[in-house]
Image (cartoon, rainbow, N blue to C red):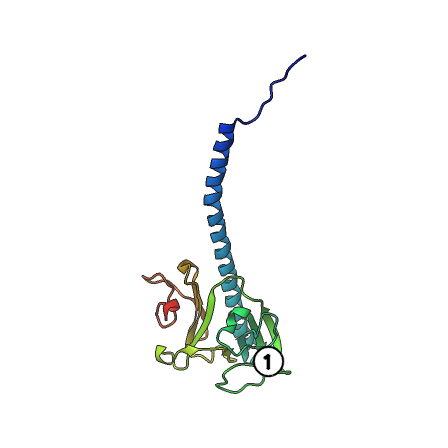
Amino acid sequence: MDTKNQTGFTLVELLIALAVASILLGVGIPSFSGAVRNSQVSADYSKFTQALYLARSEAVKSNSNVTVCPRQHPEAKQCGSSTLDWKHGLLVFVDEKFASGEAAASIDPEDELIYVHDKQSSKNDIVAIGSIDGSAATASSRTYIRYDNDGTADWASGSFLMCNDDEVKLSRVLNIAPTGDVRPGRASGSKFPRDIFNREACVI
């Protein structure tokens, strides 16, 4: 009766293979998770930037006031009134009726909704800080930004802070210049990006 040799892994070879696989997984999974988080932050940052550029452009093009506000909740098509609502997403609309200096914006029947940004995918906290005279002394948390028909904002200057205390490198800042232009905050000799007032944005 013929016999055939059975080929396969020995116990030692199997243990070595498992050890190598464990090492590769241990190195690869954290790197992959970090890449996913960075991608989520970048996507949120890009959408935020897009919304602000669109609002400014539409204000000039339509010769009207255009407002950017946070959503009241992730499915809402009405502005939130809390400074914490920015994490729920954004609404951009032509603002036909408003009161100067109002605490929160609202979308009225005659207003035209032109852009909806869904709830952010990252875990960054988002805070809007605006100043009435361009100085840090008058800067306070805001629940909307409104662009006039000349492209300037109702803030003299300010910043959107997208902060991550656990992973500082994932923090982002969008600065609103006195002209209404949108500019990325840059790290300048510190671990956090700088806001429009040249402060470490996420530690104020």
Q: Quadrant of the C terminus?
A: bottom left
Percent position of residue 127, x then y: 45, 71
Q: Is residue 178 visible?
A: no
Quarter of the N terminus within the rendering: top right
User: In the image shown, does 123 or 52 lie closer to the viewer?
Assistant: 123
Q: Residue at x 47, y 49 (%)?
A: 30
Q: Which residue is mark 1?
A: 107
Instruction: Name which residue lies at 44% across and 59% down.
Output: 170
Task: Indicate the position of residue 93 as horizontal and vertical percent values.
Answer: 58, 76
User: Dot 1: within a 10 Å radius of its alpha carbon, few (fewer than 14), some, or many (20 or more) residues?
Assistant: many
Above or below, comparing residue 8 to residue 122 in the picture:
above
Q: Residue furthest left?
A: 189
Say what amino acid the circle numbered 1 marks.
Ile
Q: Position of residue 47 (x, y in %)?
A: 53, 65
Callout 1 secondary element: loop
Residue in view at x 48 percent, y 85 percent: 101
| Residue that lies at the very extreme toward the bottom in this rendered image | 99
- Give the answer, above or below, for where 27 lies relative to 173: above
Residue at the far top: name it. Answer: 1
Question: Eyeballing the image, is 166 above or below 129?
Answer: above
> Is residue 136 shown to the viewer in this render?
yes
Q: Nearer the viewer, residue 59 or 8?
A: 8
Q: Is residue 110 left or right of residue 98?
A: right
- Image position, residue 153 (x, y; %): 47, 78
**Does residue 113 appear left or right of residue 46 in this picture?**
right
